[in-house]
Image (spheres, grey):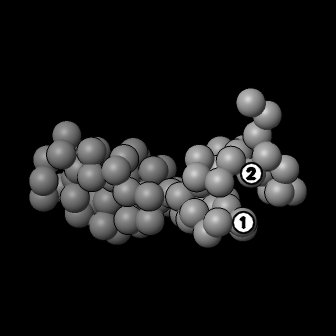
Amino acid sequence: MFCIQEGKKREIGVAKSIMACVFLTPVIGYFIIKSSLKLDTKGCTWCGNKYNEAEYCGICKKDEQGELRPS
């Protein structure tokens, strides 16, 4: 059930997450699935940081409207 639930949300997918858990034991498969990137990352439209998931970007410190994070 974990493979289906988390595999849908991640880049690795359901099929690969099930294979990882079956062939590599569930403990190692768990870490492979959790280390996979999420598909629904917002990204930053200002600097191109595709891994940004926060309200403010960690690189350029801007939000979706382009306003800088208050210091």
Does the image show residue 32?
yes
- Label 2 near label 1: C-beta < 8 Å? yes
**Residue that label 1 marks:** 46
Q: Residue furthest top?
A: 71
**Horizontal arrangement in the rendering, residue 63 relative to residue 61 (left or right):** right
**Horizontal arrangement in the rendering, residue 29 relative to residue 1 (left or right):** left
Quarter-wise, where is residue 46 in the image? Answer: bottom right
- Residue drawn 12% across and 53% down? 24
Determine whether 19 is above or below 54 in the image. Answer: below
**Horizontal arrangement in the rendering, residue 62 relative to residue 49 (left or right):** right
- For the residues labelled 1 and 2, the Cα–Cα distance comes to 8 Å
Quarter-wise, where is residue 36 in the image? Answer: bottom left
Q: Quadrant of the C terminus?
A: top right
- Residue drawn 12% across and 58% down? 23
**Residue that label 2 marks:** 62
Q: Residue furthest front?
A: 71
